[in-house]
Amino acid sequence: MTSPWKDARSVIVTTTPTIEGHPIQQYCGIVTGEVIVGANIFRDLFANIRDIVGGRSGSYERILADARKQAIEELQAEAAALGGNAVVGIDLDYEVIGANGSMLMVSASGTAVKI
């Protein structure tokens, strides 16, 4: 038995409205993936120190990259569940949410298609 995630990861994703050389045969619907991550107090402390002395915050960059990857994987899984094998027109959005801006939401949306 194959995992639905394995099939989902083969779904092509692109920010462009088409995929060159692959005409869209069918539109399956709008798909989304959202991930919300909380900030860790120790990461915040070290990020603030890094802001003072300069440099990049590697811990935040890793968290952001992981959240983006998870949102895209959710988008791919939803597209596969609708019978699509690609998602076109992907838009990535980032938003700070929570009582004190303590959480980050990464959302991905696009149109599932069959090519």
Image (spheres, rainbow, N blue to C red):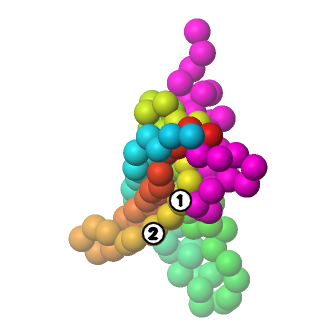
Q: Secondary structure at mark 1?
A: strand
Spot occupied by residue 39 in the image (x, y as percentages of width and height): 43, 64
> Could you say which quadrant of the image residue 109 lies in?
bottom left
**Magenta stretch, main secondary structure class:** loop
Residue 5 is inside the magenta segment: yes
Q: Residue furthest right?
A: 21
Q: Residue at x 33, y 73 (%)?
A: 101
Spot occupied by residue 77 in the image (x, y as percentages of width and height): 50, 36
Horizontally, residue 52 falls left or right of residue 27, namely: right
Q: Specify few, some or many for label 2: CA neighbours under 10 Å numbering under 14, 14-19, or 20 or more.
A: some
Q: Residue at x 63, y 74 (%)?
A: 57
Is 6 located above or below residue 37 in the figure? above
Q: Amino acid at mark 2?
A: Tyr
Tell me the tag on residue 90: 1
Q: Amino acid at mark 1?
A: Ile
Q: Give the position of the C terminus as an image quadrant.
A: top right
Spot occupied by residue 73 in the image (x, y as percentages of width and height): 54, 43
Instruction: Inspect this view and state whether residue 79 appears.
Output: yes
Q: Residue at x 66, y 89 (%)?
A: 53
Q: Secondary structure at mark 2?
A: strand
Residue 8 is inside the magenta segment: yes
Q: Specify few, some or many for label 1: CA neighbours under 10 Å numbering under 14, 14-19, or 20 or more.
A: many
Q: Which residues are magenta?
A: 1-24
Is 69 located above or below residue 58 in the figure? above
Q: Nearer the viewer, residue 62 or 33?
A: 33
Mark 2 highlights which residue? 94
Is 73 located above or below residue 50 in the figure? above
- Total number of numbered labels? 2
Q: Nearer the viewer, residue 52 or 87?
A: 87
Horizontally, residue 98 falls left or right of residue 74, namely: left
Q: Residue at x 40, y 62 (%)?
A: 105
